[in-house]
């Protein structure tokens, strides 16, 4: 091989090594680490969205196979909006509690309010 070919090959390897070193150094900077972490967060969010969509799709498929109606479908057929689990039904009145019988009220407070 001629000297010119070796020179071009050496220059190419040098440019490649400098570019790789610059990328590695950029990854270790605070901005680079923040970019990596934000990319990881986006990936986790996309993964959880895909899992959630797959779970809902599978649940719908199973409900259709078993002939069960979902809470959402039942509520929509009844003309109401479904409420998430654990939230009180807005159509039901809230129970009225007597503050003097509350277990969180100390005896001193109960006596002073009477």
Image (cartoon, rainbow, N blue to C red):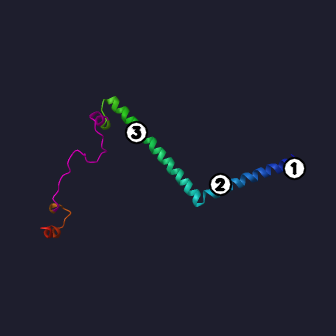
Q: Nearer the viewer, mark 3 or mark 1?
A: 3
Q: What kind of element bears circle 2?
A: helix
Q: What kind of element bears circle 3?
A: helix
Q: Looking at the rendering, in which quadrant would you find the C terminus?
A: bottom left
Image coordinates for residue 54, horizontal then vertical, percent: 43, 38
Specify the principal SS of the magenta part.
loop
Q: What kind of element bears circle 1?
A: helix
Q: Earlier in the sequence, mark 2 or mark 1?
A: 1
Indicate which disc residue 55 carries: 3
Residue 43 falls left or right of residue 1: left
User: Up-down: is 88 above or below 54?
Assistant: below
Q: CA distance from mark 2 to mark 1?
A: 30 Å
Q: Please tell me how crowded label 2 is: few (under 14), some (14-19), or many (20+) other residues with Cα within 10 Å.
A: few
Range covered by the magenta-colored residues: 73-99
Q: Earlier in the sequence, mark 3 or mark 1?
A: 1
Q: CA distance from mark 3 to mark 1?
A: 64 Å
User: Up-down: is 78 above or below 36?
Assistant: above
95 vs 5, nearest the viewer: 95
Q: CA distance from mark 2 to mark 3?
A: 39 Å
**Residue shown at 42% from the left, 41% from the top:** 52
In the rendered image, which residue does mark 2 sit on?
23
Image coordinates for residue 57, horizontal then vertical, percent: 40, 35
Q: Quadrant of residue 63?
A: top left
Residue 113 falls left or right of residue 76: left
Q: Is residue 81 magenta?
A: yes
**Residue shown at 72% from the left, 54% from the top:** 17
Residue 72 falls left or right of residue 25: left
Q: Please tell me how crowded label 1 is: few (under 14), some (14-19), or many (20+) other residues with Cα within 10 Å.
A: few
């Amino acid at each position: 091989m001629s000297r010119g070919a070796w020179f071009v090959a050496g220059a190419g390897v040098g440019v490649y090594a400098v570019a790789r070193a610059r990328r590695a150094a950029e990854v270790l900077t605070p901005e680079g680490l923040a970019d990596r972490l934000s990319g990881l967060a986006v990936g986790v969010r996309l993964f959880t969205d895909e899992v959630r969509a797959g779970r809902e799709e599978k649940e719908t498929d199973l409900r259709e196979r078993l002939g069960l109606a979902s809470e959402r479908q039942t509520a929509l057929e009844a003309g109401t909006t479904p409420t998430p689990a654990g939230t009180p039904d807005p159509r039901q009145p809230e129970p009225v509690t007597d503050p003097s019988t509350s277990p969180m009220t100390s005896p001193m407070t109960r006596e002073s309010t009477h």
